[in-house]
Image (cartoon, rainbow, N blue to C red):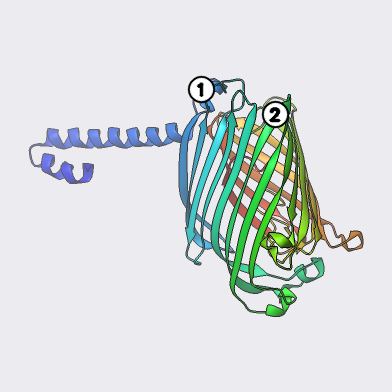
Amino acid sequence: MIATTAPVHAIESNDSVTSVVNDTTIAKKGLLKKVLSYLAPDLNMSDKESSVGLTIIGGPHFDTMTKLGVGIVANYGYRLKGCEAPLMPSNLLIKGDVSTAKFWSVEVQNNMILSDDSKRINSLLKIEHMPLYFWGIGFPNGRLDENKTLMKQLRVEFNTNILFKLSQGLFVGPFIHWEYNKGDSIDIPELLNGQSLHQHNYGVGITVDFDTRDFITGPTKGIYFHVNQVFFPRFLWNGNYGFTRTDFCFSIYQKAWRGAIIAANLHGLFNYGTPSWATMALLGDNNNMRGYYHGRYRDKHMITAVVELRQKLWRWLGMAAWIGGGTVFHDINSMHLLPNFGLGLRWAIRKHVNIRLDYGFGRNGESAFIFGINEAF
């Protein structure tokens, strides 16, 4: 708008030209200030004030799987009646992404705290279509570069649980899970071991949480212990792939020195029975074993561990460094350690809500750049 109106005023006099130039400069500075004020939190706000509200951010990205893409993330912190501070706020996260590699995804994640934290409802809906590289099942297949084959996959996942508070920090409740995977094609079908490209999975189970964190999106203290026991019986429309899954994680957060948080996470996923290629434990994603291609290493079981230093540098700018390792395996004799380490930058767009830029490294020089919001765990 400034570009179109400036020539009109410039016809009047030289004074008008000077006025327009000054106005333009002021307008540009005003826009820059608006952008910076949006990306930078008010450090004088209390945790109660800053933990609620809507934050939207997006932009281009590039990685080896999805190529050039554009993503947008909306994070909404809110409090229902009866859940005022110092209780943790509820959190709604919405992500959208599309890329030149015919990849697209939509994700909605909601962690809702109700009735003075006497109940919690957690839910996830994720739909994604992606060109997926597939190396086969098991560590020996994953390590072979010549096994790398392209699969086009549509994946839909929905799960939810309702947790009831039993005592301070302890919650228990039912859990349901539905997942659909459709592979359009695969270059080397022998890697599927005769399994179908189309998979439906229905599961029911129970969740146990012990949670003393101060915030979901960026904890600074407390512990989080989570166990999810899910049953996928054959009679529940799971066909030939009946199995049982135990998923647990233990995280601890401790303030070290000024502006520093030490965070540690232990995660295990164990499948008993006959899980399909789509429901096996997959090592590597935006939160776990960062730097590994998600799903290059897949098998029935997985264990990972990581320790991360999160250090505030200046105002809303911070950094992170982590080291850890993990493995996928069929039995105890097939375990192989995969190392993991990396560095990251943090930009606080709201107290306890960070833009996360991580670069992770893995075995044999494997690495990846991760752009996200909120901490990895």
Could one spot residue 375 in this view of the protein?
yes
Question: Residue 217: horizontal and vertical position, in percent?
Answer: 61, 36
Residue found at x 74% / y 68%: 240
Q: Secondary structure at mark 1?
A: helix
Q: Amino acid at mark 1?
A: Glu
* Viewer-nearest of discs 1 and 2: 2
Question: Residue 97: horizontal and vertical position, in percent?
Answer: 49, 55
**Which residue is more in the foreground, 345 or 22?**
345
- Residue reaching furthest left? 12
**Which residue is more in the foreground, 78 or 345?**
78
Q: Amino acid at mark 2?
A: Lys
Question: Residue 68: horizontal and vertical position, in percent?
Answer: 49, 61
Q: Secondary structure at mark 2?
A: strand
Residue found at x 57% / y 46%: 372
**Which residue is more in the foreground, 337 or 194?**
194
Q: Quick one: label 1 or label 2, which is nearer the N terminus?
A: 1
The answer to whether 32 appears left or right of 334 in the picture is left
Could one spot residue 352 in this view of the protein?
no
Question: Which label belongs to residue 292?
Answer: none
Give the image quarter of residue 316.
Answer: top right
Q: Is residue 274 above or below residue 76?
A: below
Badge 2: residue crowd in 10 Å (few <14, some 14–19, many ≥20) = some
Question: Which label belongs to residue 165?
Answer: 2
| Residue wearing tag 1 | 49
